[in-house]
Amino acid sequence: MEMSMIEKTQEQLADAGLIAVIRAKDAKAAEVVIHRLIDKGITAIEVTYTTPGASKLIEKFAKIDGLLVGAGTVINAEQAREAADAGAQFIVSPGFSGELADDIASLHTFFIPGVITPSEIMEAVSKGFRILKLFPGGTSGVSYMKNLAGPFPDICFIPTGGIHPGDVEKWLDAGALAVGVGSQLNKASEEDLQRIFNRTKQK
């Protein structure tokens, strides 16, 4: 059976391993960062809606072959529709809202809601979600995600927020589907990135 677009996106995120979260003061600054990250070998980016001109950036970079482009910090249906229309292949929210989940369902775009507590996870699961953003991942830590695997063995997490590139492998080894890294990517060494890329190729 042929995979759906959502299933393909999920597989691409897992193959990428690392999602570059783009948050900038303006579109020009964001564009410079994105180009720099592409040059470093990044294959998945998440343009946050706190960045001015986010939809235009999504539309521009979604046209690049081999680059997976999503929208982040989406908190309402209007942003979600705009992102989908711009070509976002996935949409990420910092928290969970049943109403937003229902709105995005009609867009047929891969939606990754954010959670941090067991109660939020249970609510997301009740809506049919199995892949969730763990936010803030850096604050909760790898051990917290591992503990969540006990009561929620069928859930895949994408930890994001305050995570250093050098720790991405630890999260992946602990079972994360992929890891979102923001401004700390500026501190990433070529060795850090190459280890991540090599690891995902070996999966």
Image (cartoon, rainbow, N blue to C red):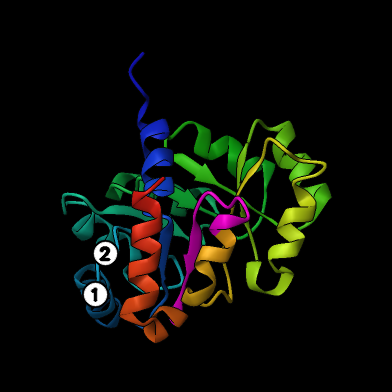
Q: Residues within 10 Å of mark 1 (few under 14, many from 20)?
A: some
Q: Which mark is residue 81?
A: none
Q: Where, by quadrant of the figure, is residue 167 drawn?
A: bottom right
Whether tag 1 and tag 2 are in contact, CB under 8 A, the answer is: yes
Task: Kindly state the secondary structure of the residue where label 1 is placed.
Answer: helix
Task: Kindly state the secondary structure of the residue where label 2 is placed.
Answer: helix
Say which residue appears at 58% left-offset and 71% top-offset.
161
- Residue 182 is one of the magenta-drawn residues: yes
The N terminus sits in image quarter: top left
Vertical order, 31 against 64 (above or below): below
The amino acid pointed to by label 1 is Glu
Q: Which residues are magenta?
A: 172-183
Instruction: Using the rendered image of the protein, determine whether residue 75 is visible from the camera's viewpoint.
Output: no
Badge 2 is on which residue?
A: 57
Q: Position of residue 48 (x, y in %)?
A: 43, 66
Badge 1 is on which residue?
A: 31
Q: Where, by quadrant of the figure, is residue 12 drawn?
A: top left
Say which residue appears at 70% left-offset and 69% top-offset.
141
Q: Position of residue 21 (x, y in %)?
A: 43, 68
Vertical order, 13 against 185 (above or below): above
Vertical order, 131 against 19 (above or below): above
In the picture, measured across the screen, residue 114 lies left or right of residue 151, that is left
The amino acid pointed to by label 2 is Leu
- Residue 165 is one of the magenta-drawn residues: no
Say which residue appears at 32% left-offset and 54% top-offset.
69
Disc 1 versus disc 2: distance between alpha carbons? 7 Å
